[in-house]
């Protein structure tokens, strides 16, 4: 099978870690029957400064018409608003209808308090539709502002369905020997429908309906729900109890950054932006100007994002090989980058993981 992968390094350490994603794909054993064709694509702040566009049309065209998946590094955002500049990854999610943000947070299975969860965040609506307005009314004490929180049946059903599919797939990975702390699939629906009975209420109803589909029930996917505030508490007290979490946009954003803090370094945490038949793997971290150019960026978030992209392209076996090689590096803990307390360079970490692959 030939997979055409777009590579969008972006700014800063994006350029140091995205090549690692390419190398691990090229190093996959030939017995998997995978071939890759890579296209380098531009996006980001430096692209904007050179060309006036943060997301050139060619990048979107090639992704839409000539790629099966992509890897995105990171982009820098100017600290002050710059006229004409807006985040290319946000634009890409819209243009390619990548409606889900998927963020696994995992420690090695041998950790003192092991974690293995994935947060599935709806990425097109909720408060982030950005329909805000500022008004003035003496009865409100002067100026006030308000925002629309929009939740639709369609978006809620499809995100919960994706969470169910992910739960099933993770179970398959476990059954094929991939080390995990969970014995059976579980999806936790997060909301605040006790207060927001219409918006979060609709999300909750739709999520339950989607997850009641027979393929999830027959696949042994258990479903629970949890109010988002008590979820934060439990996420920090007993993070090991979660498998798949599905959440509306805002809660998902907050939960996924919070969960990332549980594993010690942003350099470990992958994500994927996923739509129908397309996935972009993206490390959670930014362009890290403080370590740019030093050759010490942790490549693991990118390697795991690469594996995650492969999962969504239906290549679970290849993904499992990458995850296992990364975990072996972390478990042995001899060649770690400085963010994990080690001394290894990006290059040393990558070559250690490639050897294990
Ligand atoms: P950041 O994620 O770039 O860095 C935060 C801290 O984590 C820094 O100390 C950095 O050195 C460290 N770090 C991040 N990734 C690492 C890795 N792979 N290995 C080792 N250490 C790592 O976040 P920050 O500093 O808030 O933002 C820097 C720039 O990145 C800004 O312009 C921001 O707008 C942008 N950004 C872009 C994102 C994206 O492209 N999706 C996400 C977050 C920030
Ligand atoms: Mg965030």
Image (spheres, rainbow, N blue to C red):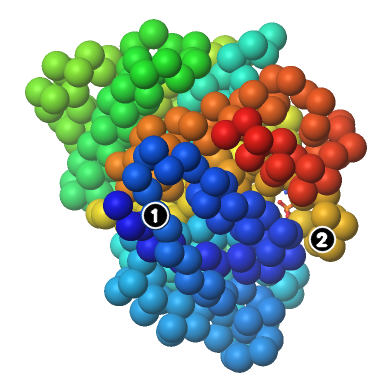
Q: Dividing the picture into quarters, in which one does residue 165 lie?
A: top left
Work out which residue is located at the far bottom of the displayed protein and give it: 51
- What residue is shown at x 45% (from left), y 77% (from top)? 59
- Residue 292 bears which disc, if any? 2
Whether the residues at callouts 1 and 2 have beta carbons within 8 Å, the answer is no
Q: Position of residue 320 (x, y in %)?
A: 45, 30
Work out which residue is located at the far left of the displayed protein and give it: 214
Q: Residues within 10 Å of mark 2 (few under 14, many from 20)?
A: some
Q: Dividing the picture into quarters, in which one does residue 49 lie?
A: bottom right
Work out which residue is located at the far front of the displayed protein and give it: 31
Using residue 101 as the reference point, say whether residue 14 is left or right of it. Answer: right
Using residue 217 as the reference point, say whether residue 280 is left or right of it. Answer: right
Quarter of the picture holding the C terminus: top right
Q: Position of residue 12 (x, y in %)?
A: 74, 65
Q: Position of residue 63 (x, y in %)?
A: 38, 70
In the image, 323 versus 270, the foreground residue is 323
- Residue 35 bears which disc, if any? 1
Q: Judging from the image, what secondary structure is the residue with disc 2 in?
A: loop
- Residue 178 in the image: above or below residue 155: above
Closer mark to the observer between disc 1 and disc 2: 1
- What residue is shown at x 66% (from left), y 76% (from top)? 45
Q: Residues within 10 Å of mark 1 (few under 14, many from 20)?
A: few
Q: Judging from the image, what secondary structure is the residue with disc 1 in?
A: strand
In the image, 30 versus 207, the foreground residue is 30
Q: Is residue 250 visible?
A: no
């Amino acid at each position: 099978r030939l997979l055409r992968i777009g590579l969008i390094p972006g700014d800063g350490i994006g350029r140091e870690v995205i090549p690692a994603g390419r190398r691990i794909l090229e190093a996959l054993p030939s017995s998997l029957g995978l071939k890759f064709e890579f296209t380098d694509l531009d996006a980001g702040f430096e692209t904007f400064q050179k060309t006036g566009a943060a997301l050139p049309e060619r990048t979107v065209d090639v992704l839409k018409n000539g790629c099966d998946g992509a890897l995105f590094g990171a982009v820098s955002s100017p600290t002050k608003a710059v006229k004409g500049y807006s985040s290319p990854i946000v634009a890409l999610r819209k243009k390619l209808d990548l409606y889900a943000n998927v963020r696994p947070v995992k420690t090695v299975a041998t950790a003192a308090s092991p974690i293995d969860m994935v947060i599935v965040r709806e990425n097109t609506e909720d408060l982030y539709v950005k329909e805000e307005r500022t008004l003035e009314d003496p009865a409100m004490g002067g100026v006030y502002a308000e925002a629309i929180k929009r939740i639709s049946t369609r978006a809620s059903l499809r995100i919960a369905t994706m969470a169910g599919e992910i739960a099933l797939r993770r179970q398959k990975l476990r059954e094929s020997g991939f080390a995990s702390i969970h014995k059976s699939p579980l999806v936790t629906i997060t909301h605040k429908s006790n207060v927001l009975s219409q918006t979060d209420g609709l999300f909750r109803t739709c999520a339950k309906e989607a997850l009641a589909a027979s393929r999830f029930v027959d696949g042994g996917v258990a479903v629970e729900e949890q109010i988002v505030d008590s979820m934060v508490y439990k996420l920090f007290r007993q993070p090991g109890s979660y498998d798949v979490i599905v959440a509306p946009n805002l809660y998902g954003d907050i939960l996924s950054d919070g969960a990332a803090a549980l594993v010690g370094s942003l350099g470990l945490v992958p994500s994927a932006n996923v739509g129908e038949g397309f996935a972009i793997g993206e490390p959670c971290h930014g362009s890290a100007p403080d370590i740019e150019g030093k050759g010490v960026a942790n490549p693991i978030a990118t390697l795991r994002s690469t594996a995650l992209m492969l999962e969504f392209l239906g290549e679970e076996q290849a993904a499992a090989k990458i995850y296992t090689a990364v975990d072996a590096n972390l478990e042995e803990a001899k060649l770690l980058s400085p963010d994990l307390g080690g001394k290894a360079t990006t290059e040393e970490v990558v070559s250690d993981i490639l050897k294990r692959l």
